[in-house]
Image (cartoon, coloured by chain):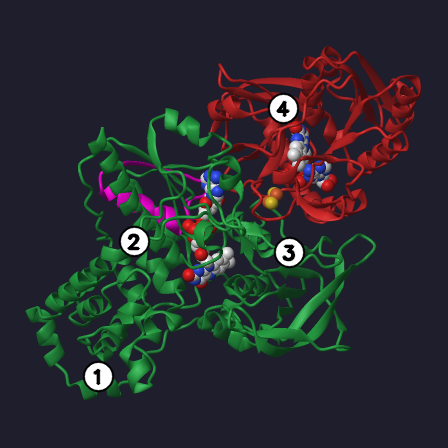
Chain colours: A green, B red
Amino acid sequence: MENILEYLKEERSQEWRAEIRKSMKAKERTSRERVKMPEEDPNVRNKSNIEVNSGLPIENAVLEAQRCLDCPDPTCMTGCPVGINIPKFIKKIEVKDFLGAASVLKETNGLPAVCGRVCPQEVQCESTCFYTIKLKKPPVAIGYLERFAADYERESGKMNVPHVADSNKIKVGIVGSGPAGLAAAGDLAKFGYDVTVFEALHEIGGVLKYGIPEFRLPNVIVDVEIDNMKKMGVKFRTNFIVGKTASFDDLKKDGFEAFFVGSGAGLPRFMNIPGENYNGIFSSNEYLTRVNLMNAADPDYDTPVISGKNVAVIGGGNTAMDSVRTAKRLGADRAMIIYRRSEKEMPARVEEIKHAKEEDIEFMNLHNPLEYYADENGRVNRMKIQKMELGEPDASGRRRPVPIQGSEFYIDVDTVVVSVGVSPNPLIPKALADLKVTDWGTIVVDKETMQSSIPELFAGGDIVRGGATVILAMGDGRKAAAGMHKYIQEKIKAN
Amino acid sequence: MSKILEKEIFSKNVVKLVLDAPEIARTRKPGHFVIIKIGKKGERIPLTIASADAKKGTITLVVQKVGVTSGKLCNLEVGDEVTDVVGPLGEATHIEKVGTVLCAGGGVGVAPLLPIVEGFKKAGNRVITILAARSKDLIILEEQMREFSDEVIIMTDDGSYGKKGLVTAGMEEVIQREKVNLSVVIGPAIMMKFAALTTKKYNIKTYASLNTIMVDGTGMCGACRVSVGGRTKFVCVDGPEFDAHQVDFDEMLARLGAYKDQELEAYERYMKTAETVS
Ligand SMILES: Cc1cc2nc3c(=O)[nH]c(=O)nc-3n(C[C@H](O)[C@H](O)[C@H](O)COP(=O)(O)OP(=O)(O)OC[C@H]3O[C@@H](n4cnc5c(N)ncnc54)[C@H](O)[C@@H]3O)c2cc1C
Ligand SMILES: Cc1cc2nc3c(=O)[nH]c(=O)nc-3n(C[C@H](O)[C@H](O)[C@H](O)COP(=O)(O)OP(=O)(O)OC[C@H]3O[C@@H](n4cnc5c(N)ncnc54)[C@H](O)[C@@H]3O)c2cc1C
Ligand code: FES
């Protein structure tokens, strides 16, 4: 920690930083309004796949960067799970060195264009910004600026391929190509390892591809990053399920020295209420996979999806918001969120809730489904719902929803998407009897090195945390890469 | 990418394909399946691995043309590539020596039954196989089944081949005649339902291999879910085989029809383009 503070101080005292600080009075900086993100018209975007946020124009990015006070004690950084040097990248934007800003981001975050779009900044960096905590004003738009710098770099065509150390010819395997796996792969490639990423699906990217929709995170953004990793020498094997297509032992025989498991929290949960297996009731994973991964809404593609007219989505997280907004885009007249707590407790990003409201999504908060009913073909046509109120706080600190007796009523629905959470993917724990897992099925690891109970196996992301976030998954991947590097080097020394 | 190395036409709508898939060939066991996808815009469909040769690194699929994707696959030729093949998936069949095994297959269930018949025979069981279809031209894989069965009974609804009657009539006949230790049924949900009711009467342990609709095949989506003994199970990871007496076949039947309209539409569209191409 000492070291980091020293380093930040040194960085901050560099001439260009001091100069730019002096170039404008603090008062002038703080008197500015926070920029607004340009957005597509809600009534246009809710009928297409176009990205909702179109990104800051250059002038506005610079104006917003000027709001940042370049604090001596950058509290914003304490809110960032990967410790991005936030003031430095923002000041680079202020001096219009946009490529420089991007490379600052990439020192600690391999996928800034993704994180700038999907991180819950309002509970991370922006919640600990000086503006939020001291001035009680809207924080510097750190997320918008992150996205701006990363997009600028990509669109400039001058994306730099990170420097890769000379190959040490040591083979390491990454299980899963979500953000955790990609982050680990990137760092291990930089250290000089021969890295292969194994992915069960036919596409690379994990949730970034099959879960988060195009209107929030266009696939090209993920693809550019993957191409970059290929240039760094990372190999990708799709359609390869570790534990099924080949076992860890098979891979060890093929020369793999260590593994990182970032297999995600892929198992959808249902509520186990009557009628939940009727047709027209999906898990959000199935619904989003059909639309995002299989392109089911495009008639040129072979996979079908049901485009309901009355769609109910159960849940209040990002997955629920993505599902309900997807339903609207597939032509629903009524697309509604049914959530058992109130809006304040919703785990979704604030921006997604705002966007959903603008897009004509109905919110039935403090409601809970009890039962589904179907027509003679087994297709859902009605559901029973109960009203809820908030009681005492529960273990999560959120107020517990309590049913209101006698408040049951029925609504007509033809499609239901159940989005009440996911459990850790059981494939890897099932394949390894010696692997220590928790009662919830997450893999137990050392918090610093991310090493599991099997020495050559490291893990991170949702398989360790349960459903978490992109940035935490990436942070884990990087920590694990460092842990693996140390483990392998020590093993070599010992021999 | 997996290259097609051999192709054999079993009947008008059934082909055997041998694919180059060394890793899958090395680890697969009877009862396992793969998911394939053809082309960038293709759909993912599950197919049982009928047999495999670990040395040659090949797997064999027996495909019945029922819709768009199975149709596209049947039309591929030796040298063509199947874009995506992933597996082996599911739990392997519990093959052991039990005595007499009564296997019954109908419709799309006949192809997945083949490796199971072979497995039980090779484990030293007496295997009686019943193949059922509406009429003679729909009976498939008879010759291949004979190779691994002590007896093959053909049942057709219209009596155009073998005996006239439903699969259950054939099963009753065998059960009345001799001691059956285990039964395996694969076919349309409605057939499995009545086959299971039949064996239940006689208290014969019965497995059904469920061919639900699937997407990923790795337990990630829940499209394949069924109720078994009152609990929701995912066929792709918990199955595909289950105790037939515990499966809610009515629910499964309804779920298989979920996309009927879209499937029909897609098939008609596909047939139109197929016609203009050829
Ligand atoms: C719809 C949706 C929206 C979300 N929105 C946000 C958001 O806005 N912001 C945010 O921060 N987070 C969001 N999240 C959460 C975030 O996406 C996850 O926390 C993150 O993706 C976890 O990363 P991961 O690498 O651990 O796993 P995943 O992204 O789940 O990737 C795991 C990969 O491993 C593969 N795999 C599994 N087992 C094997 C095996 N045995 N062999 C080979 N491959 C295997 C899987 O197929 C998958 O591709 C969202 C999640 C969903 C589902
Ligand atoms: C574990 C498993 C193993 C299987 N093994 C084999 C195999 O070895 N050989 C083989 O030929 N088929 C097998 N099937 C069935 C095969 O997956 C389906 O026939 C295929 O998905 C149909 O796709 P399609 O696009 O060609 O037809 P679609 O256009 O999707 O459907 C056409 C018609 O077939 C019916 N249908 C679709 N899917 C199924 C299904 N899963 N079961 C029964 N009817 C269905 C539809 O209701 C429709 O009437 C297996 C299925 C499972 C789940
Ligand atoms: S096919 Fe998706 S969970 Fe079984």
Pointer 4 residue: B30
Q: Residue at horizontal 80%, vertical 29%?
A: B205
Q: Nearer the viewer, mark 2 or mark 3?
A: 3
Q: Amino acid at mark 4?
A: Pro
Q: Residues within 10 Å of mark 3 (few under 14, many from 20)?
A: some
Q: Residue at horizontal 56%, vertical 71%?
A: A394
Q: Which one is earlier in the sequence, the residue at label 3 or at label 1?
A: 1
Q: Is residue A191 one of those drawn in magenta?
A: yes
Q: CA distance from mark 4 to mark 2?
A: 43 Å
Of A210 and B210, nearer the camera is: B210
Please provide percent x and percent y for residue A229: 30, 44
Q: Which one is earlier in the sequence, the residue at label 2 or at label 1?
A: 1
Q: Which mark is residue A29?
A: 1
Helix, strand or loop at label 4? It is loop
Of A234 and A80, nearer the camera is: A80
Q: Is residue B157 left or right of residue B217?
A: right
> Which residue extends farthest left?
A15
Q: Residue at horizontal 87%, vertical 19%?
A: B179
Pointer 3 residue: A270
Q: Nearer the viewer, mark 3 or mark 1?
A: 3
Q: CA distance from mark 3 to mark 1?
A: 50 Å
Please provide percent x and percent y for residue A69: 20, 79
Q: Is residue A329 left or right of residue A378?
A: left
